[in-house]
Amino acid sequence: MPKPILRALASIALFLHMVPVPAMAQQRGPLVLAAASMQEAMGAAADAWAAQRHARPVLSFAASSALARQIRGGAPADLFVSADEDWMDDVERAGFVQRGSRADMAGNRLVLIAPARAPLKLRIARGMPIARALGDSRLAMANPDSVPAGKYGKAALGALGVWPGVANRLALGDNVRSALTLVERGEARLGIVYATDARASKAVLVVGAFPAGSHAPIRYPLARLRASRNPDAEGFRRFLLSRAGQNILARYGFSRP
């Protein structure tokens, strides 16, 4: 290659090297693994954090059980938000949680929903005729063997004495949002989701809320993971627990822990 061209290329390379790259472009935001029910609220919190001139956190949503398996499999994540304490306990016992970083971030309620275009009246109480209300349809819920919303739902139906009547009439989703979608589409006449999920959808109506004593308290623990290397991870964790972060969560229907 002729020397003048080489000199020109070298000058261009030097110029590009000297041009400052904004810090926001150099740094990726912390990777947050969060329960599927947190989508809207965590998105709003991430936007608020980014508005403070931080790199926007990278959010990944799934069932808490699936996220816990990813963490145990070595996922290079910074923060974990679980929809129940059991899966946070699981990763903490396995040594993946940074000591002293775990805290309850939010609470929620469990509700029974129906499609907005086909509302049902059903009083949630012991012995309620939920099987009859289903007709030839099914009850949508997250998998009760592993997903927190499903476990809460099974416990609530059991406490009300109606689980045996619906146990073989379930339409199972791999997370709570999958169950919500089944009801939205009219593929299930009833469904069990969190109150915040129902609030996020215009296609469903709340039939009623399950009594708090019918299932374990719904708590969302937050923790920083030992694999975390992002310098913003701890700051975003504290932001979620701060008054500003809690106000954002409350705006989407989550209760304070």
Image (spheres, helix red, strand yellow):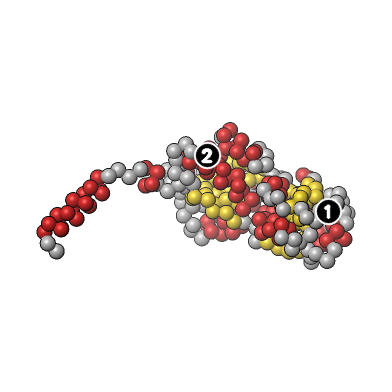
State the quadrant of the N terminus.
bottom left
State the quadrant of the C terminus.
top right
Query: How many other residues sit within 10 Å of disc 1, few (<14), some (14-19) or many (≥20)?
Result: some
**Mark 1 or mark 2: whose residue is earlier in sequence:** 2
Query: How many other residues sit within 10 Å of disc 2, few (<14), some (14-19) or many (≥20)?
Result: some
Q: Is residue 209 visible?
A: yes
| x and y percentages locating residue 207 in the rendered image | 80, 50
- Identify the element where label 1 is drawn: loop
In the drawing, what numbered circle is on residue 88?
A: none
Q: Residue furthest top?
A: 243
Q: Is residue 89 visible?
A: no
Tally the marks.
2
| x and y percentages locating residue 198 in the rendered image | 71, 49
Q: What's the CA distance linking mark 1 and mark 2? A: 38 Å
Q: Residue furthest left?
A: 3
In the drawing, what numbered circle is on residue 120?
A: 1
> In screen coordinates, is 112 left or right of 174?
right
Q: Which residue is mark 2?
A: 48
| x and y percentages locating residue 189 in the rendered image | 79, 59
- Identify the element where label 2 is drawn: helix
> In screen coordinates, is 24 left or right of 252?
left
Q: Could you tell me which residue is drawn at 88 percent across and 56 percent down?
A: 129
| x and y percentages locating residue 234 in the rendered image | 48, 41
Q: Is residue 177 above or below residue 211?
A: below
- Amino acid of disc 2: Ala
- Amino acid of disc 1: Leu
Front one among 80 and 97: 80
Front one among 10 and 98: 10
Q: Could you tell me which residue is drawn at 51 percent across and 60 percent down?
A: 73
Q: Quadrant of residue 231?
A: top left
Q: Could you tell me which residue is drawn at 60 percent across and 49 percent down?
A: 39
